[in-house]
Image (cartoon, helix red, strand yellow):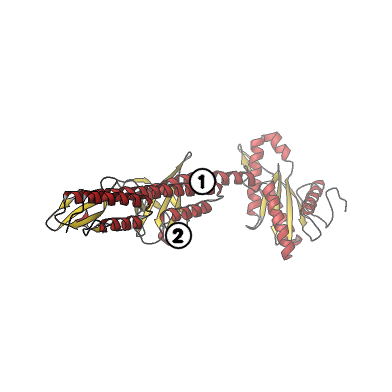
Amino acid sequence: MAASPPELLLGRLRALARTLREAEGRQAVLQALVRALDSLGSPVVVHLPAGPLDQELISTRTSADSERTLVPILRYGSQPVGALVAPAMQTEAFVGALETAAELAASRLGQLDLQATVLRRSLELALLNDLSRGLNAAENSEEALSLAAAGLSQLTGPVELALYQLREGIPALVSWTGPAEVFPATVRILDGSGQTILGGGRATGMRTGPGVVADRPALVHVLRSSAGLVGVLVIRRAVDGPPFPEDQTALALALVEHLAIALHNVEVLAWSRHQAAFDDLTGLAARRHFLDELRREVARVRRQGAPLSMLMVDADHFKVINDTWGHPAGDAVLVALAECLKEGTRTLDVVGRLGGEEFGVLLPAADVEAALMVAERLRASAENMRVPYAEQSLRVTVSIGVAEWGPELSLEDLVELADGALYRSKKAGRNTVTVASALTTMDGTT
């Protein structure tokens, strides 16, 4: 077959360079190569497979034998991504043209790869930024985990997450987004050499980094924050698939860092809410939380028509205890009285410390007769209570006011009725229970 003149080869290569500059995508590069090589007048086969190369096509330099001439397409200078195969015994000029065509194609493929990588990284960073904002706004670990799972699924394909928090040094499963049965309740975390770094006993062992959990590729990460260890996160493919590649592992690690901070913030937020909702000393509902519960119960009974009663409880002569024994003694009495009230009520009842030595007890589904029985039982329990303090046994009695909500009453009316009944118990000599009449207030007016 006649060789192409050098001028023709040069012209074809210039045309190929122009075409490749406009080519968008691997297929367009392949088509441009085929057209350019067809015009050279010698049959050339272009191998540019989407998957791995055949072993016989992998080469780092032009090679020739009795059957063919092989010109590799080397991306980034050394990585073979394809090859040009021409009949044997080609002229030096023709082989040079093939090498130039392969370099032009490799250069364009590299540019396209770089553009795709930059675009992908930009999208990934934007997604990570959005996820970070969402995680920072999460109100609990389940919400944070769900957001992280959704984000990682967009970045790496469908995944399931399991969160373990440390309980007495043992990582225990607390939240997950996939089937619970694939994650053991507790785990031991192992380092790369197989040494235990967290957990112990007979818990299932998981190595940090890439691994396998329940027969699927997984990533295991220890979560840390400024406060120290937060827990352990297991990221597992939701469907069968290959191990996580290195770039996906890096993305997962970036998201895990945001998740660790978010989980720490969730803990801080939960602690802050607990502090606002519950009394530090007694552990009972604080006044605001108690009134919120009362508001919810009033709304419920308005809809359902069920009874609702409330007790106001006050420790008698409490100032004497503080003045005689000191405030630590008073605190011990309040703690003991709080336990007495909790033990004497049901789990659905709400017991709160409303201020100082005054307590409230909310009794859903209890009419005034049932509330009176509860109040008498609480009064007797307090009277029989002994509070050990400084080798002494302190005693206290309580006065109680009882009120039942009625359709004509507001929340404030119910509180005022119970408070008025308590006031009359105090005036009657203390250590007694008084039931409010329907519209009697604290000052005795109706």
Which element carries disc 1, helix, strand or loop? helix
- Secondary structure category for the residue under label 2: loop
Name the residue located 72 percent from the left edge and 40 percent from the top edge. 318
Query: Whole-percent x and y of residue 358?
Result: 72, 45
Image vertical order of residue 103 relative to residue 331, above or below = below
Mark found first going from the N terminus, 2 or 1:
2
Question: The N terminus appears in which quarter of the rendering?
Answer: bottom left
Residue 297: x percent and y percent? 70, 58
Type of amino acid at the residue the image marks with label 2: Gly
Q: Determine the residue located farthest toward the left in the rendered image.
A: 66
Name the residue carrying label 1. Answer: 262
The answer to whether residue 132 of the structure is visible from this angle is yes
Measuring from the top left, give residue 258's x and y in whole percent: 48, 45
- Mark 2 lies on residue: 178
User: Horizontal placement of 170 versus 88: left or right?
Assistant: right
Q: Nearer the viewer, residue 4 or 19?
A: 4
Quadrant holding the C terminus: bottom right
Q: Are marks 2 and 1 in contact (CB under 8 Å)?
A: no
> Taking 259 as reference, is 307 left or right?
right
Q: Where is residue 141 in the image (x, y as percent from the top left)?
A: 52, 51
